[in-house]
Amino acid sequence: MALRGKVAIIDLTSGEIIKKSIPEKLRRLYLGGRGIQAYLIYNYLKPAADPLGPDNVVIASAGLLTGSIAPASSRTEWGGKSPDTGALASSNMGGFFGSELKFAGFEHLVMKGASKKPVYLWIRDGEIEIRDASHIWGKDTYKTQQIIREELGDEDIKIACIGIAGENLCRFANVRTGPKDSAGRTGNGCIMGSKKLKAIAVRGSLDIQIAHPKEAIEYCKKAIDQIMMTKVAKAMSVDGTSYIWNVTNTSGLLEWMNGQINRFPFGDWHDMTIEAFEEYKTGMAACFNCTVHCRHQYRLKNGKGIPTFGEGPEYNTQTAIGSFGLNNWGDMLLNWQLANLYGIDTTGWSNIVRGAMELYQRGIINKEVTGGLDLSWSNASKITPILMEQTAKMEGFGAILGLGHLGLIQELSKYSDKVGYYILHCKGLGKLGNVDRVQPSFSLGIATSTRGADHLRSRPALDHYHLPEEVLKKLYGGYVSSDYTSYDGKARMVRWHELTYAVVDCIGTCKFQTVFFSPNLPCYNEWCKYLLYITGLEFTPEELFDVGERVYTLERMINYREAGLTRKDDYPPERSFKEGLPYGLKPVRGVHLNRKKYEKMLDEYYELHGWDSNGLPTPETLERLELDKEPSHII
Amino acid sequence: MQKVILVDYAKCTGCRLCESICSLNNEGVINPRRARIKVVRWEWEGWQIPTICQQCQDAACIAVCPVKALKRDKELGYVKVNYDLCIGCRVCIAACPFGGMSFDFVTNKVIKCELCGGDPMCAKFCETKALQFVDVASADVVKKRDLGAQVLMAIGKAEEQQLR
């Protein structure tokens, strides 16, 4: 069965490895992927554990359908307790690692304890071996994978590893697999580094049983046709996620210079478009079982001693690395490539660097603090590769940047009490370069997200499409305004997307092939059919929605238990309430959030979720979602 | 009518859906190690090459098989394995110049592409048309057309540059 994947509990202190099955009861409650992972975190993480200590866990979870033929079923979720935010760590990556893990007989790997010396895991067909990694400690993420493949004698081994940023406990270090895919946010790589776990190598040759092969083949072909028919799939096939950059940029929906301006201020924006990237592009590639193939492949023109081949970048990186003064693709790609080799989350790093640059601009910090570096916006192309290396090595000014947003604010607040205002984050996680303040749904989404400022938890892209209100009402089950600047019904919209994306992360398909981008892409009805034909599990759309609600609420409980997060932490950065932006479309210009309306929206949001006015689940909600008995320690 | 799976290496994106769907259609399970097609990847260079039986006219596998277990199907023209005769010696794997022969370690038998009996799933699911199921007689024409289109694009680019 597709449901046979095991949970492995790996104690890196003692070397003990326990393998467990997932009971059907938990399947119905949490499906798999992010859902079962939230369950495992709540059960296996010692309350109030030090994120960098042996009591923390780092969990790799393949989605329920990962490795099946459901379209784009490639995803792997990573989580634990974030050293970056102190709350939930959660990050999702594509590529080929998750499917290989499934072929090796495992679905979830729970790594606890900490090894004394560097190690890596070698997993194949139900067997797990802990091996010495002292010879790869200190190597970049490309070299690490190459050495392990050579050592084990198989080029098809899939490896998830950390770079030197993770080893040196940079708080937003990521986990990487292949040349591109990263579980970028919330510092899972840092947790691995703290456990001296350099890599996980996987190779599998076990069958994944499919409940109804004939129907599965027929239905998946139909679903692929449905996906490839959409305009967004066609655009993504050519330009990747970057296809929206031109629109958001010219509409004034991108923030530059840390949210001070919303029009490209460093030269001609045409040099920054995805069309200008063609000069470097060598092709497009795909993740496991994906027909859309949105991954760019490129060659650097001057690698300066680093590998010149790479994959990416994404829209998010384009807005992140591009937001602090770089004005050509050569510089952008160099920084991107370095981040990938060191194993650094580009979004987190970019946000913290542009925050520091604004502090420098305002004279709050100076060259004495930055170790002699001139952090002027005009100096970006010169200093960013240096800052990247310093951050990865946790040296010089990088030792402060690498502490993450909360750490940096704490460290620099001695220079001014305004530091917290200029470092843009929610719950300690850096905000990406999209303008949130003109779109209440977007602000609410990044502010309430269970992993901190992030769009992949709830991004309501449909808000921009001006769909008829009857359509929105049918989709969301209640009134939602079709005006993206309105607050009406947006709490309902955000909650619906939160629960829906939680379900997507549980089943392990790519969000880009769901309602994330278009109402014509697969949603609950399609997922129910995937589940039935592939796993044999019968779910109704309503039941799936309940799973999403359960997972989201459990994540909320983790955040409360570990970091005491409540209503006070559900606000976007203060700047979004105070400053408008000068350019772009008319509804964008000069607009910032209205605090009173935001509070009202937040109240509505809590009510829909069944949480009290402080943002905590009520006893009735816990009982309804069967969360009142957690942690239940069934696995 | 004889048909073949035509491979255009430049169009492959490396998604490996062909491997999944091949094993599911032929073995009833998903397991790329038991598929009749394999995408070989050079991840650090960005290259991906599908390897599959080309149904050669003068097939090396047929020539080397010591027990004559490999025969050509009269109707569709593909090379098929007679499992009553096959002894699993793997000589065909060594002889094939395309990596088109595979070994199923579960059943301990040689496996190869037999065109899914006339409706090959890999070509059906290949969105970029890196794999196309075409008449053996027009296989070269399909290829020529694709290359012609590339020349057209190159000419277009050259003209664009002259205008500048």
Image: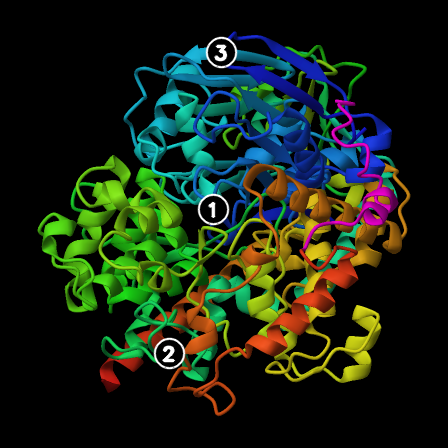
Q: Give the number of the disc on residue A13.
A: 3
Q: Amino acid at mark 1?
A: Arg
Q: What element does badge 2 sit on?
A: loop
Determine if marks 1 and 2 fall on one subunit: yes
Looking at the image, do the residues carrying marks 2 and 3 touch, with CB atoms under 8 Å apart?
no
**Closer to us: A39 or B85:** A39
Closer to the chain start, of discs 2 and 3, is 3
Query: Residue at the bottom extreme?
Result: A586
What is the chief secondary structure element of the magenta stretch?
A: loop
Closer to the chain start, of discs 1 and 3, is 3
Magenta span includes A626:
yes
- Mark 2 nearby-residue class (10 Å; few <14, some 14–19, many ≥20): many
Determine if marks 1 and 3 fall on one subunit: yes
Query: Based on the displayed image, in which of its 4 quarters is residue A42 positioned?
Result: top right
Q: What element does badge 1 sit on?
A: helix
Q: Give the number of the disc on residue A185.
A: 1
Is residue A262 depicted above or below A206 in this figure? Answer: below
- Between the residue at mark 1 and the residue at mark 3, the CA separation in whole angstroms equals 26 Å
Chain letter of mark 2 equals A
Q: Say which residue appears at 71% left-offset and 10% top-offset.
A: B87
Q: Say which residue appears at 67% left-offset and 49% top-offset.
A: B123
Q: Say which residue appears at 32% left-offset and 46% top-offset.
A: A339
- Residue B93 placement (x, y as % from top left): 57, 21
> Relative to residue A330, is residue B93 drawn left or right?
right
Q: Say which residue appears at 48% left-offset and 70% top-offset.
A: A243
- Residue A33 placement (x, y as % from top left): 68, 38
